[in-house]
Amino acid sequence: MAQAPLPQLHACARTAFNLSPQDQTYIFDMVAAPGAGTLAVSASNHVVKVYDRNTLQLKSLFQAHAGPITSLNFSPVDANMLLTFSRDGSVKMWDLRTSQAAQEYRPSHHLELHSGDINSTGQAICAGSELSGQDAHLVLWDVRAPQPVFAFEEAHSDDITQVRFSRVHATRLASGSTDGLVNVIDTTTLAPGMSAEQIEDCIQQTHNSSSSISKLCFFGPADEYVAATTHTDDLFLGHALARPGDDSDQIALFRDLRRDAEKAGVPVEYAVDIVYEPASTRLFLVCGTHDGNLSVYHVNQHALTPATLLPGGHTETVRAVHWDPATGTMVSGGEDSMLVLWGPNPPAAPLPRSSGKMHTASKARAFSPY
């Protein structure tokens, strides 16, 4: 069945993360607090800025880490608490009312942390690490204590680039790595002292995408599926749990998003993110071009269907988006250091263009861990 296109979105507000034309800071990531209208944005200078999600008005800022920030997550039970994960080896829980770290978490020995998430009950934190020795580590904490409760070393053989808890099953975790694997893990019984065989039994599903994982999410009404993009711009869809008697748990594999998009007449040079909309049970893929244009595709088992275009918001590569299906709005951030708010209604007057100050020198320093 053909899916209805999304409404056309217009760039209705724009703000620079840094106001100095000489500042070559670019945006890494963004996350919105559930129901609070608050947007947190991280950048290459290791700073987090907090904005009003609906206006892009700056509310606060703080120096979060001594190294690159690799993940941002709001607590699902307290919109004032923000988690940041960093390659400096720390996880910090920030109280946005004071812009101070209320708690800091570290692995039992130094590891660069490349990804992280907090579960749907707000009780468990997991971080994915760089490769250390022969294994990369999934490190779990109880939010109440700074010491880890478990370190899982059997899941991946290279840097863990994505960690995602299910929004439906609080103890179900998906991880993705540069080793090409996507693992789905039941964290319920993980405990110190378990044998390697017992730990491996907690892995409920393994998919091999044959390419380094870039983005990862659960989708479906019960989070029964996983979707992943790769650093070579493939898109993988699979079942989250192994199905007895079925040899193939792969649903679809789009090997070259650029080629599939060109068939639809829309230029695409990379994938930005995967977005699942629970209300309509639709999965979307946000793509971009290096001159700053965005496009959104509806994903189904057999094809990528253009859903809407978002041209002219940026002048450089877009690194992060936050889409709010409830309001029909999106925020995007990129290497031009600009935040753009997209909405269904065009602005009363044309917005000034992005400064486009990110040039070759800044791109050479761009943080790209893989």
Image (cartoon, rainbow, N blue to C red):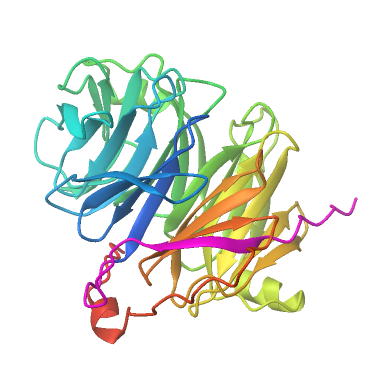
Foreground: 182 or 80? 80
Q: Is residue 365 above or below residue 106?
A: below
Badge count: 0
Name the main secondary structure of what is drawn in magenta: loop
> Which residue is depicted at the point 28% across and 67% down?
19
34 sits left or right of 348 in the view: left
> Which residue is depicted at the point 64% across and 31% down?
224
State the quadrant of the C terminus.
bottom left
Using the rendered image of the protein, determine whether residue 137 is visible from the camera's viewpoint. no
> Which residue is depicted at the point 27% across and 77% down?
21
280 sits left or right of 232 in the view: right
70 sits left or right of 111 in the view: right
x, y percentage for residue 166? 51, 29
Foreground: 12 or 48? 12
Does the magenta-highlighted stretch encompass residue 30? no
Foreground: 325 or 187? 325
Q: Is residue 239 above or below residue 228?
A: above
**Numbered range of the magenta stretch:** 1-25
Q: Which residue is the extreme one toward the left?
A: 109
x, y percentage for residue 69? 25, 50
Q: Which residue is the extreme one toward the bottom?
A: 360
x, y percentage for residue 46? 20, 54
Does the magenta-highlighted stretch encompass residue 14? yes
Q: Which residue is the extreme one toward the right?
A: 1
